Image: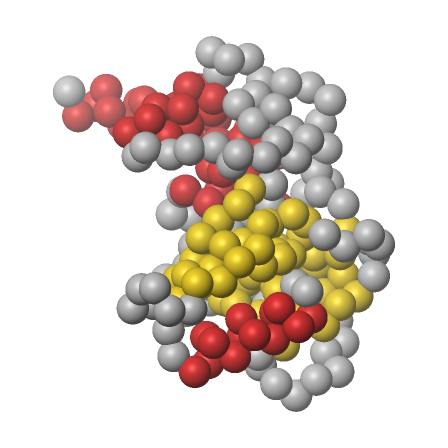
Amino acid sequence: MPQELFVSRTLPVLATTEHLLPQQKHQIRGSGMLFSQTILEAIRTEGIWIVMLGNDGETANKTGDIVTFATIESVDWLSEEQIKVELELSLWGKVDAEQHHKSDRLLKASLFPLWHSDKKASERDRVVTQLQQWQAENAYHQPPTDIGYDFNTDPCWLCWRWLELLPLPVQTKQRLLKQPEPTLCLRYLKTMFRQSDRYTRLLR
């Protein structure tokens, strides 16, 4: 995990429709020469930028866009048909205005601190209960290592998990992530839940 913040790092980049955000561990799979080279380069540089890719092809790699910094914990090259990579997603970065490289396989971004909130969500809050329901239905297991967050009620962690799950446009997710705190994101999520309730009642 990087020791210095607000510094620029040029790292290999992986654009994915799985919009992976910090404070978790995650497994990715891939195959082919390009994927292998990207993983090898990420091991060498001790980091990789994870970039949001929309289903419409929109990529969040423009100046000021939010990307996630990840380190590779382990790689299983041979036991399955695809390469299996264990990631720890710890921080995020903001894409720099100047890119001094010519390869689209590299990205320069500046590391900066994650959101922080001293407030906790109520255990009865919809953002908490519905996420727990989704986790139960999908046999989701929380990371084995607690890296400083009360996973169930921390508003920052809740926002990141919902933004990963919801099929929102990349532009919307970026707008919410560029806020200095999770307040706007929580308000957006709660508005979505209320609208969903009204829509469900109309269908009945």
| Image colouring | secondary structure
Q: Residue furthest left?
A: 204
Placement of 18 over or under 131, stated as above or below? below
The reply, left or right, for residue 124 in relation to residue 147 is left
- Residue drawn where x is 49% and y is 42% of the image: 163
| Viewport quadrant of the C terminus | top left
The reply, left or right, for residue 100 in relation to residue 132 is right
- Residue drawn where x is 76% and y is 54% of the image: 2
Place of residue 144 in the rendered image (x, y in percent of width and height, measured from the top left):
53, 34
The reply, left or right, for residue 68 in relation to residue 108 is left
Q: How many numbered marks have been drawn onto this rendered protein structure? A: 0
Placement of 105 over or under 82, stated as above or below? below
185 vs 12, nearest the viewer:
12
Place of residue 37 in the rendered image (x, y in percent of width and height, measured from the top left):
52, 79
Place of residue 15 in the rendered image (x, y in percent of width and height, measured from the top left):
49, 66
Q: Residue furthest bottom?
A: 102
Can the viewer see residue 186? Answer: no
Place of residue 99 in the rendered image (x, y in percent of width and height, measured from the top left):
72, 78
Placement of 126 over or under 140, stated as above or below? above
30 vs 103, nearest the viewer:
30
Can the viewer see residue 128? Answer: yes
- Residue drawn where x is 49% and y is 62% of the image: 75
Placement of 1 over or under 134, stated as above or below? below
- Residue drawn where x is 66% and y is 35% of the image: 147
173 vs 43, nearest the viewer:
43
